[in-house]
Image (spheres, rainbow, N blue to C red):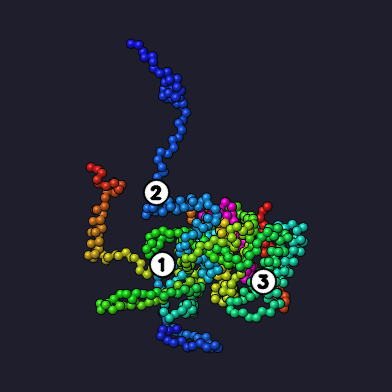
């Protein structure tokens, strides 16, 4: 539901606890290790449970969920700052969500490599051309078929 | 000058003089000389891959000539971390992963033996009498557990133990003893209840990513510990469904990811290989296993959890792993292992039920050499045939079974009538 909130105690006969507009956030991350095609990896708040993750995805985003597995990643408390005090990197919880109905998900490439094209007549473009010509001059004669200059006249 | 005439005549008389030897047998080939130097082998104790390989191959040579008991002991003696494969699992897509681990191709439907049975008319009436007797037996067992006996409510996840397990016990023992007339091998069989079946095998390799052994290549070890509801063991092997070298079109799925992604977890404990009885038991071949679906995996519960697709996946995964473990253990009891592959296929059957729905599976083990030095590109693969879950009855009301399906019972009887060729 929310961080730093005490849930109302459940007693037999109480209606189902319902939360509208939860304050949790879920972050979709690229998996560090190769995952199967139907598995999506999230970083979630430490207070969330597997049931919370399932309901969150199914009710808010209508994503069919088959299985959820979670683990807590402990981050180091060993680093020290300039005052020699230990600095803790915060822990986080990771959820592996398997989609049902044979759906698959592949994390997209967010930073695709694009070819740098400089403007016409700029300094960078002339430099690039000059470097390209230099490199061309350094290459051996293609008519020699890969044989070095050492063998020859 | 007088010619020296006192030269010894022996020289010319002896047949083995060099003069005669050199002229004799010029056309014949000289005997091939034996190796002049001992073979060039890699060291045994060096810190090199070839040394390790030599030690391993010498160990395998030693095992080749040993008794089955010593072979099993030699292969399972050393304990290391291994993946524990559970036949009954919630993991999504488990049947495809398990097919990859056991090199099994799954074929929907049953083999030709069970599907193309052309019964002549004379046997029809005889069959009907036997069938009606068995039908009444099964119906009575069903009504006894669900209707006649007064059973109170159990704890959660206690339904199967209270209603279904006694029912399956009764029908198994009833059917085996009634069909012993028709199928003589059942008279010599051994019916076990709650047996243990264990199997340990090695498949594939991995490079250790971290730790003091990082960078080294180690094999991936697996272990199955299964507890079927009951099983029938016979003294002779069942006939094969398909010849050993036959070409089957179904493919074994290959998964490039490591087993941890399934998820599958590793533990280190005793490596056991057991068929349900010890090595000296005369009933060392398997006939049929019966499995009961636990409450957790019952179709009602899976439907409530929004996992209707997992019902069939669970049944297939259970059948493939249980039968692979059983047939593999039977083969190891006969002295076959990954370097000495099976010379004849090992065949077993399984029936998985949750009380109302029955699924039938047949398994043929063609190879134990999943990744071995002697057969690097093994073309053989194991085969598993299976049906979808077939409903035996619809419901039970007022001492009556409604919606009875005879085909399921016929298939059950056919499975139990399967007998070795004599």
Q: Are marks 2 and 3 in contact (CB under 8 Å)?
A: no
**Residue projecting furthest to the top:** B1
The magenta-colored residue range is B334-361
Provide the residue designation for mark 2. Answer: B42
User: Would you say residue B74 is visible in this rendering?
Assistant: yes
Question: What residue do we see at 38% from left, 77% from top?
Answer: A91
Q: Is residue A82 above or below residue B323?
A: below
Q: Quadrant of residue A4?
A: bottom left
- Label 2's element? loop
Mark 1, residue position: A33
The chain letter under disc 2 is B
Structural crowding at the residue carrying mark 2, measured as other residues with C-alpha within 10 Å and reported as few (<14), some (14–19) or many (≥20):
some
Judged from the image, the secondary structure of the residue bearing numbered disc 3 is: helix
> What distance separates the C-alpha of mark 1 from that of mark 2?
38 Å
Vertical placement of residue B7 versus A145, above or below: above
- Mark 3 Cα shell of 10 Å, populated few (<14), some (14-19), many (≥20): many
């Amino acid at each position: 539901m929310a961080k730093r909130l005490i849930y109302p105690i459940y007693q037999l006969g109480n209606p189902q606890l319902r939360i509208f507009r939860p304050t949790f956030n879920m972050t979709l991350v690229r998996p560090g290790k190769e995952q199967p095609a139907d598995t999506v990896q999230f970083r979630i708040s430490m207070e969330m449970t597997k049931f919370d993750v399932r309901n969150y995805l199914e009710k808010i985003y209508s994503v069919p969920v088959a299985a959820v597995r979670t683990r807590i990643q402990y981050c180091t408390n060993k680093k020290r700052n300039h005052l020699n005090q230990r600095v803790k990197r915060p822990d986080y919880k990771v959820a592996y969500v398997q989609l049902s109905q044979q759906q698959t998900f592949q994390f997209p490439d967010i930073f695709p490599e694009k070819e740098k094209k400089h403007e016409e007549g700029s300094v960078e473009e002339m430099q690039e051309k000059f470097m390209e010509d230099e490199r061309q001059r350094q290459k051996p004669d293609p008519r020699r078929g890969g044989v070095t200059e050492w063998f020859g006249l | 000058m007088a010619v020296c005439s006192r030269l010894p005549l022996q020289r010319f008389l002896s047949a083995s003089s060099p003069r005669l030897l050199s002229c004799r047998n010029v056309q014949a080939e000289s005997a091939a000389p034996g190796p002049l130097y001992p073979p060039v082998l890699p060291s045994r104790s060096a810190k090199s891959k070839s040394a390790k390989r030599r030690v391993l191959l010498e160990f395998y040579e030693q095992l080749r000539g040993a008794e089955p008991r010593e072979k099993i002991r030699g292969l399972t003696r050393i304990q290391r971390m291994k993946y524990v494969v559970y036949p009954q699992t919630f993991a999504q897509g488990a049947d495809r992963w398990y097919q990859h681990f056991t090199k099994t191709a799954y074929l929907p439907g049953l083999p030709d033996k069970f599907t193309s049975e052309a019964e002549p008319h004379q046997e029809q009436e005889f069959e009907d009498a036997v069938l009606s007797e068995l039908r009444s037996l099964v119906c009575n067992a069903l009504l006894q557990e669900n209707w006649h006996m007064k059973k109170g409510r159990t704890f959660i996840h206690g339904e199967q133990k209270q209603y279904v397990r006694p029912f399956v016990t009764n029908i198994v023992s009833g059917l085996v003893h009634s069909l012993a007339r028709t199928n003589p091998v059942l008279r010599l069989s051994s019916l076990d209840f709650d047996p243990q079946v264990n199997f340990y095998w090695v498949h594939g390799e991995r490079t250790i990513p971290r730790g003091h052994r990082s960078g080294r290549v180690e094999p991936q070890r697996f272990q199955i510990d299964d507890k079927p509801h009951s099983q029938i063991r016979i003294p002779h092997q069942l006939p094969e469904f398909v010849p050993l070298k036959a070409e089957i079109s179904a493919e074994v799925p290959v998964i490039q990811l490591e087993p941890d992604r399934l998820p599958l977890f590793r533990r280190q404990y005793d490596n056991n290989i057991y068929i349900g009885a010890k090595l000296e038991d005369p009933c060392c071949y398997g006939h049929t296993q019966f499995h009961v679906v636990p409450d957790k995996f019952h179709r009602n519960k899976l439907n409530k959890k929004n996992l209707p697709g997992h019902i069939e996946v669970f049944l297939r995964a259970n059948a493939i792993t249980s039968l692979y473990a059983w047939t593999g253990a039977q083969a190891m009891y006969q002295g076959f292992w990954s370097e000495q592959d099976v010379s004849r296929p090992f065949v077993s059957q399984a029936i998985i039920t949750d009380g109302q729905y029955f699924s039938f599976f047949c398994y043929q083990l063609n190879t134990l050499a999943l990744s071995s030095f002697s057969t690097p590109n093994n073309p053989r693969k194991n085969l598993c045939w299976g049906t979808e879950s077939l409903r035996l009855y619809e419901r039970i009301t007022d001492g009556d079974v409604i919606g009875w399906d005879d085909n399921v019972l016929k298939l059950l009887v056919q499975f139990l009538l399967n007998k070795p060729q004599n």
